[in-house]
Image (cartoon, rainbow, N blue to C red):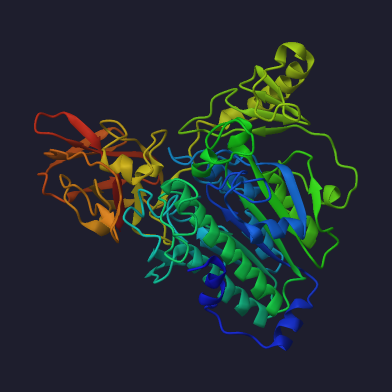
Amino acid sequence: MKRRTFLSSTALAAASLTTGAFAEAAARRQPNVIVILTDDQGYGDFSFSGNPVLETPHMDRIGAEGVRFTNFHVTPVCTPTRGQLMTGCDALRNLASAVTAGRTIIRRDMPTMADLFRKGGYATGLFGKWHLGHDYPDRPMDRGFDRAVWFKGWGLQSEIEFDNDYVNPRYLDDLTEKRATKYCTDLWFDEAMSWMQTQAIAKRPFFTYIATNTPHMPLWSPESHAHLYEGKADANVAAFFAMIANLDDNIGRLDRWLKENQLFEDTIVVFLTDNGGTVGRSVFNAGMRGYKSSHYEGGHRVPCFLRWPGGAIESDLEISTPTQVQDILPTLLDLCDLSARGAKFDGTSLVPLVRKKPFSDRMLIVQFGLRDRPVKYDAAVIWKQWRLQKGTELYDIDADRAQKVDVAAQHPEIVARMRAYYDAWWARLEPGFSQPVLMLLGTSKQNPVMLTSIDWWEVDADNINFVSRAVGGPRGGVWHVDVRAAGRYRIELRRWPFHTNMPIGSVGPRKSINGRPLNHPVKQIPARSVVLSADGAEQAVSVTPDSVGATFEVNLTKGRHQLQGWMRDGDGNDLCGAYYALVTRLTDV
């Protein structure tokens, strides 16, 4: 199928409204807002940046019709970027500073973008990836979204979703589990447009967050686009580019829908990606050093486009001033004339830059915890053309985008100034690094609660490969929990996800999905007992490799506790953690 044929072959899920109804909805004072965030698409994965193979006409057009921030920075991995986008605050301050290791949840005393838009009278909807908590009170509907069509974990192959599929994905409609019969990216855009149509009928402004899980691995492109780049790149890159082509066509679909329904002029669209280059960097990385997870430029410099055809924003405006993902929330509140009451931002409104007015000189810091606790100087400090790396290396990015020549010795005063700024920033934030955001048990809002290895404190185990290979140490990690109601609790521990009902010693749920290999080698576990530790007090239940898991009952007082579960062999040797725990409050004590 030709790429442009796809545009006409994927009809909107929603029925059309009359022109008059949409015209009335578009006439309101406050603009609609759509934020589109793609996953693992680097700066080089666009036509506009010079990619010699990939075509992204619809993405590029958003920038051509609005503002292109070409020196824009996120965090080199996904959760911290998403937390910064939602709060306007540094990852190390909002505490969602890593993709795993119990550091994926935003501080609960910080309002989110959805909270602030909802307070301003907007309908709020999320479609796609959240990755900022999967239990109450950290789910998207707990953090300000009226509607959430989403999934848990970092993706459809995370340790929570496990054997999910891109082509017929299992997903949550708010809290109801459903199964789609279409490609995941098509689903997110279809559901978003259907929901926005409902808001337009009601003449209510909307804030829509479309956060795709593509083109993140696994490299499963839709059949409609799978052959677009065959022969133009190796098989992996061709599949990766095909996923981006599908994304690009969906953005074209969204733009046509906005125009046809007279919402285009009065809708702000923000487009960005969540980290630097991944699969596509082997073809083109825009001349930058580093890629996803790196604090060098290629790990965190991404495109950001802002378009508002009916607002006081120029088209085809390029801004090379350093900017950052924390700036998006205060910028949107400024453009929409919404209150930031209750929020304190690390980011700054970019409206002065957009309107060519004076903008204050500032330094920016890019830092996260790669797998666990943040490390001092494992960061990039950005100031004008300068990049301070690791606290000692200095690069002039304008003269040396590839960061090949360390010029620290030639500019000691620049190094000293940037390092002093970083040191003061670190000193303010470091005391909070040892404080986990506690998982809540025993609330009336959710019972039972599923705990998984992504919540293990400072242990990295967030995908099917970790679970399949029994990685994460012989005892796994600790779950830090806050019991809100004292009582008798049942705790079920398992190695494999609960929805699979697979025995501890098995090779797992599936080795392929629709003929596509999952490629995760399995370590079989000769378990003979499962151990639960509650605040250091251990109890064990005998099992065999054919057992699905083990069940315990414990009394838990109100307040903070530490839970941990793991497997042992017949000689009493610890094997691996219990990757999943289902905790149910049974009765009061």
- What x and y, as percent, mark residue 392? 65, 16
The spot of residue 87 in percent (x, y) is 64, 49
Q: As displayed, is residue 82 above or below residue 127?
A: above
Residue 306 visible to an observer of this rendering: yes
Q: In the image, 177: left or right of 416?
A: left
Q: Quadrant of residue 500?
A: bottom left
Observer able to see residue 88: no
- Using residue 385 as the reference point, say whether residue 251 is left or right of it: left
**Residue at 67%, 22% in the rendered image:** 423
Along the line of sight, the residue nearer the viewer: 88 or 270? 270
- Foreground: 15 or 378? 15
Q: Which residue is pictured at 68% across the width and 62% down the height?
A: 117
As drawn, is 499 to the left or to the right of 317? left
Q: Is residue 59 above or below residue 82?
A: below
Determine the residue located farthest toward the right in the rendered image: 357
Q: Give x and y (percent) for residue 58.
A: 65, 61
Q: Residue at x 71, y 15 (%)?
A: 408
Q: Residue at x 60, y 48 (%)?
A: 109
**Image x and y of residue 8, in percent:** 55, 76
**In the depicted structure, whether residue 193 falls above or below residue 564:** below
Looking at the image, the residue that sits furthest to the top is: 409
